[in-house]
Each structure stands twice: as C-alpha cells, then as structure tokens.
Amino acid sequence: MTGPRTPNSTRTRGKLTAQSMGVRGDPTTGNIAVIWYDARNDLGTGGPGDTDGIPNTDAQVWGAFSTDGGQTFTKNIQISARTSNSHDAQNGIDYGDYSGLSFYGGIAHPAWSDNSNSTGNNPDGALHQLDIYTASVPVPRR
C-alpha cells in the first residue's frame, strides 16, 4: 500500500460518526470488511435519514469491502435498515460503545447499537433505548 485509503465513498454534507469503526480480515479469503456509523443522510431537512430536524445527529451503519488488501474498496453499502439517534436513547452510551464485526467465509457479521425499530419488535419502539442489531452481509460481486 502506498498510503492511507478511505473506504467511504460519499461526498455529501453529512459527517461520519466513527467512534468505533469495525475492521476485520476474513481468514478464509484475506478480504477486508469495514463498518462505521455515518450521518451522510442527515442534512437536518427531514426525510428518511433525519429524525429530529438537526443535521448530523442521526446515523445509519454503513460498510465496505476490499478484495485487494485495502488498495480499493467496494461502493458503500447501507447495512442498517433505518436511521437511529443515540441521543434519543438517553441511556448514557453512544454509537460505537457496543458495536463489533466478525468476518468469515465471505460473510461479514456486524453488530451495532440501533434504536430505529426497523424490525418492528423493539418493545421500546423507535428512537428510545438502543438495542443490538446484526446482519449477514456478503462481499458484493464487482
């Protein structure tokens, strides 16, 4: 590698919120998976990426993969189904406090704090207590 590389392909006004970026290598393939919290869709103007009308306070979990040792990364993939706001949880933790990433056999398994209620079965409803969500994300074909 000749220098630092970024997996983030966005050029929007929203900011990254990567207090705990997950990076893992797949021991079966040598590929790399990266996840992070990203506020790219929270411009404070309403819509699916904004829950409170304030820019850069809401986020989704995004990820990318590298199949060439980190020289290049895939297009970013939105992993979380909906938008979360850690401030609304009012429980003293923040994004990234309880996130992690496993990567094996070409499938990334991120885990993250989320209060979007995207599954519809959070007993606290949307934008309350943070729960741990997970997904199985295969390396995309180029």
Image (cartoon, helix red, strand yellow):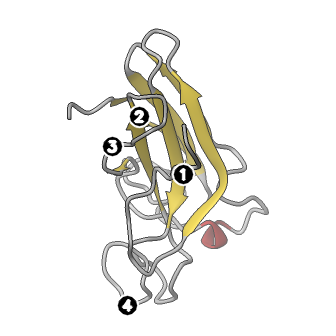
Q: Earlier in the sequence, mark 3 or mark 2?
A: 2
User: Is residue 128 among the parts visible in the rendering?
Assistant: no
* Frontmost residue, 21 versus 6: 6
**Residue placed furthest toward the right:** 92
**Circle 3 crowding by C-alpha within 10 Å: few under 14, some 14–19, many from 20:** some
Is label 3 in contact with label 1 (beta carbons under 8 Å)?
A: no
The residue singled out by tag 1 in the image is 36
Q: CA distance from mark 4 to mark 1?
A: 23 Å
- Counting residues from the start of the chain, the first of labels 3 and 1 encountered is 1
Q: Can you see residue 49?
A: yes
Disc with the residue nearer the chain's start (4 vs 1): 1
For residue 54, above or below residue 135: below
The image position of residue 51, as x and y in percent, is 44, 78
For the N terminus, the image quarter is top right
Rounded to the nearest angstrom, the CA distance separating label 4 from label 3 is: 29 Å
Tell me the CA gap for discs 3 and 2: 6 Å
- Kind of residue at disc 4: Thr
Image quarter where the C terminus lies is top left
**Residue on which the image places disc 3:** 74
Q: Identify the residue position indicated by label 4 in the image.
A: 45
Q: Residue shown at 31%/49% (left/top)?
A: 75
Q: Are marks 3 and 2 in contact (CB under 8 Å)?
A: yes
Query: Dot 2, how many residues are within 10 Å of its Cα: few (below 14), some (14-19), or many (20+)?
Result: many
Q: Earlier in the sequence, mark 1 or mark 2?
A: 1
Q: From the image, state whether disc 1 or disc 2 is nearer to you.
A: 2
Q: Label 2, on which residue?
A: 66
Q: Kindly indicate whether the residue at mark 1 contacts the one at mark 4 (C-beta within 8 angstroms).
A: no
